[in-house]
């Protein structure tokens, strides 16, 4: 069922714009002052893109994700999904966070995956069960379907969170530094598995990271943001890179280019 839907989606004109962000200004009003998180940020995410927002801590990456998810109202600019303005949260845009505590601790893997489907009543009883089994299988947790979160490793909890989002089949999956708190080996494995998942399901993903390496490995496109407040420095293609290219001069060159972009001030002088 899930696979069929994914195939239909894959057939549904890739390279058409799914998410359109224009001149986005995000601000927080705190007592005494106004914090500007992003300034005039614009980009297009096409169907099937693995679109990465890359920038240093505090440049507004999470704020952009929150705005796309519908939790934060833009001070100016617009966000459209499939041509329709985003006015609040919805099951077509689900977020996977870095925190391991995003799961319900009193529910098993399977119950955690079923939970949003039950709450939103988007699918019939049988379909929910099918979807849960299918995504648990996809993220490799069949043997842990009845395990509780506290018995799972950080990487496994992250898989449950991803499975739970995938089961809802969102139009776009929003990921906020999901692997940042994992150890290096687990992180690499999760990155590889996420790429495989993207290939299998032709998922559209908006992925936030401050790691240049992660951005190049995972992204098909990378939006490079300036330090606070976040502005667009550049938009790059990273289609051509895979894990096997990590040690190549081309990979190092792109990494260097992005480092330079990130740490140049507006006068072009490297700090
Ligand atoms: P990033 O995810 O790139 O690290 P954030 O989007 O979390 O950046 O934050 C961007 C800016 O907005 C930072 O200066 C941060 O301090 C500020 N900010 C984020 N959330 C809030 C909030 N709830 N209230 C006030 N300021 C905030
Ligand atoms: Mg953040």
Image (cartoon, helix red, strand yellow):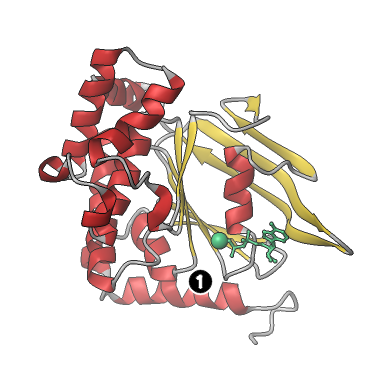
Q: Nearer the viewer, residue 211 or 128?
A: 128
Instruction: From the top left corner, tell me how far across and down residue 264 is, in percent.
Output: 64, 78
Kindly give the residue lying farthest to the left in the view shown: 143
Instruction: From the top left corner, tell me how far across and down residue 177 is, in percent.
Output: 45, 59
In the displayed structure, would residue 184 be above or below residue 61? below
Q: Residue at x 33, y 44 (%)?
A: 162
Q: Nearer the viewer, residue 183 or 216?
A: 183
Residue 202 can be seen in this image = no
In the displayed structure, would residue 4 be above or below residue 53? above
Left or right, residue 57 beside residue 6: right
Q: Secondary structure at mark 1?
A: helix
Q: Quadrant of ligand 2?
A: bottom right
In the displayed structure, would residue 133 be above or below residue 236? above
Instruction: From the top left corner, tell me how far across and down residue 93 is, in percent.
Output: 50, 34
Kindly give the residue lying farthest to the front in the view shown: 106
Would you call the spot at circle 1 few (<14 residues within 10 Å), some (14-19), or many (20 or more)? many
Instruction: Work out which quarter of the rendered image holds the N terminus and state it.
Output: top left
Q: Residue at x 77, y 54 (%)?
A: 27
Q: Nearer the viewer, residue 265 or 190?
A: 190
**Residue topped by disc 1:** 258
Residue 269 can be seen in this image = yes
Instruction: From the top left corner, tell me how far across and down residue 115 is, in percent.
Output: 36, 31
Q: Nearer the viewer, residue 9 or 188?
A: 188
């Amino acid at each position: 069922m899930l696979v069929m839907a994914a195939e239909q989606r894959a057939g549904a004109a890739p390279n058409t714009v799914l998410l359109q962000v224009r001149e986005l200004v995000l601000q927080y009003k705190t007592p005494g002052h106004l914090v500007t998180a992003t300034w005039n940020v614009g980009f297009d995410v096409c169907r099937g893109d693995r679109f990465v927002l890359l920038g240093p801590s505090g440049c507004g990456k999470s704020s952009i994700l929150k705005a796309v998810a519908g939790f934060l109202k833009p001070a100016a600019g617009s966000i459209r999904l499939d041509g329709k303005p985003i006015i609040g949260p919805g099951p077509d845009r689900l977020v996977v966070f870095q925190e391991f505590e995003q799961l319900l601790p009193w529910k098993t893997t399977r119950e955690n995956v079923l939970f949003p489907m039950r709450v939103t009543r988007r699918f019939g009883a049988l379909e929910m069960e099918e979807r849960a089994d299918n995504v648990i299988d996809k993220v490799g947790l069949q043997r842990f379907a009845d395990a509780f979160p506290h018995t799972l490793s950080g990487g496994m909890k992250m898989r449950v969170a991803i499975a739970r989002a995938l089961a809802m089949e969102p139009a776009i999956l929003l990921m906020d530094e999901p692997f940042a708190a994992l150890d290096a080996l687990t992180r690499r494995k999760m990155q590889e598995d996420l790429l495989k998942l993207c290939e299998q399901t032709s998922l559209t993903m908006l992925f936030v990271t401050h790691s240049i390496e992660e951005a190049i490995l995972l992204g098909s496109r990378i939006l490079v943001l300036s330090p606070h407040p976040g502005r667009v420095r550049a938009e790059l293609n990273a289609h051509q890179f895979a894990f096997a290219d990590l040690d190549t001069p081309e990979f190092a060159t792109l990494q260097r280019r992005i480092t330079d972009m990130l740490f140049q001030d507006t006068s072009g002088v490297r700090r």
